[in-house]
Amino acid sequence: MSSRQQAPAALVNGRARVRRLGPRMLWTTADQMVSSATNAAVSFLIARQVGEVQFGSFAAAFLAFTLAAGLNRALVTDALMVRFSAATPAALRRACGDAAAATLITGMAGGLVLVVLGWLLGDLTGSVLVALGIVLPGLLLQGTWRQAFFASARPAAAFAIDLLWAALQVLGVVLVQQATGSMVALVLVWGASGGLAAVVATVAERVRPAPRRGGRWLHRHRDLGSGFALEFGISQGAATVSVLLVGLVLGLAGVASIRGAQVLLGPVYVLIPAVTAFTLPLLAQRRKAQRPVLPLAAAAGGGAAVLTLLWVGVLLAVPDSVGFQLLGATWPGARSVLPLSGLQWALISLALGAVLGLKAHERAATLLRLTSVQAPLLVGLSLAGASLSGVRAAVAGLAVAQLVGAVLNWWVLLKVERGTSTLNVD
């Protein structure tokens, strides 16, 4: 066949792939928007009805849930997306059931830790953590089904289960507020609504999670799970410690400026999970088919970085009058660090493509080593910047650390793709 005949065929095939992936991308983005919007709506509903102390206890519980969900993804569902996205439907269905069972194990273990911690604290925050511990297995199971639907290329099902949870939790929170307004009751209803959505997904998929198979899942995929979990813990810990240290040096005003810029960059927090959920299964499928993952990884990371920078450009054009309406007295400080914060998150978005590529290659140990290099830089450079020149220098330090991380991740992925990596010993 001549090159002239091949070109139209390649063009037709490319258009067909776009038509297949277009709806999948839209459903994935819609699902992430529903999830993020619901979290924000519930937080606003609770914040408007309770005092500062009560809302602080809910914020602590939500942070604990976020960390537990991240660890569960690392321990359980990342392996599902990486190793079974290209599996046969029957094998993928069994894997989803095993991952659900493994999540019940991690959820009960995490719930027990929260119950004990809450009991030791004994105050309102302690009671809220006990309530979260009770409902944590159901919440994590809902998240696992969400990831399972992404792995099986059914983002519309993920959207449906998240929409069900959204309706249940908003309705439940409103009813509890009208009845008692108890923070413990609010957390129980919030968590129970997620558990109910998870039960609906489990019944609809005709899966019976067996604890024995869940234990086997955790053991069989411990090479990925342990590495991904440690990598997640180190990266989250470094980010948290860096902000705390900046607060110690610059006071609450410095932290408020950084947090204000993060609020303005809210759409980026929707973009990154959506890109992850859409791209990681596709990268895993390409790797299983022995096709290079670098082009798609570069498109994902580069596209996310460009979209982040475009949003930063929109924010920089916002008049001060609008900014004050959005953030009040925090606006000037947030506006001053916004360009550097935007650059920092653009670099995080850029690095995301390489991170997903390394995950698709099952390079958990490599990612852990790269994170172990970047984490001290995040803490050290932000602290040095804050000490020497204030909040903007602190954010500049974070951006430099992200730049180093992005360069290292892409360099290692390129080496892995070429089969000459010396950093990978998974």
Image: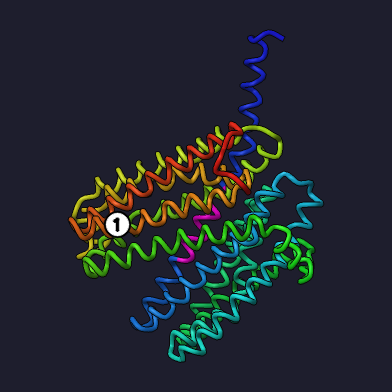
* Front in this rendered view, residue 260 or 394: 394
Residue 116 image-quadrant placement: bottom right
Residue lying farthest to the bottom in this orientation: 122
Q: Is residue 350 magenta?
A: no
User: What is the x, y in percent for residue 205?
Assistant: 76, 61
The residue at 35%/45% (across/down) is 311
The residue at 59%/75% (across/down) is 110
Give the secondary structure at mark 1. Answer: helix
User: What is the x, y in percent for residue 360?
Assistant: 62, 45
Amino acid type, residue under disc 1 in the picture: Ser
Q: Count the marks: how many?
A: 1
On screen, residue 284 versus residue 48, left or right, reads: right
* Front in this rendered view, residue 98 or 188: 98
Check disc 1: other Cα within 10 Å, few if <14, some if 14-19, many if 20+. many
The residue at 34%/62% (across/down) is 242
Which residue corresponds to mark 1?
A: 382
The residue at 30%/43% (across/down) is 313
Task: Check the picture and name the quadrant holding the N terminus.
Answer: top right
User: What is the x, y in percent for residue 46?
Assistant: 42, 77
On screen, residue 50 versus residue 6, left or right, reads: left
Does 280 appear above or below 79? above
* Front in this rendered view, residue 138 or 112: 112
In this view of the protein, can residue 323 be seen by the observer?
A: no
Magenta residue span: 27-39
Q: What scheme was used to colour the molecule?
A: rainbow
Does 219 appear above or below 10? below
On screen, residue 285 versus residue 411, left or right, reads: right
In this view of the protein, can residue 84 be seen by the observer?
A: yes
Does 86 appear above or below 162? above
Q: Main secondary structure of the magenta part?
A: helix
* Front in this rendered view, residue 329 or 130: 130
Q: Is residue 37 magenta?
A: yes
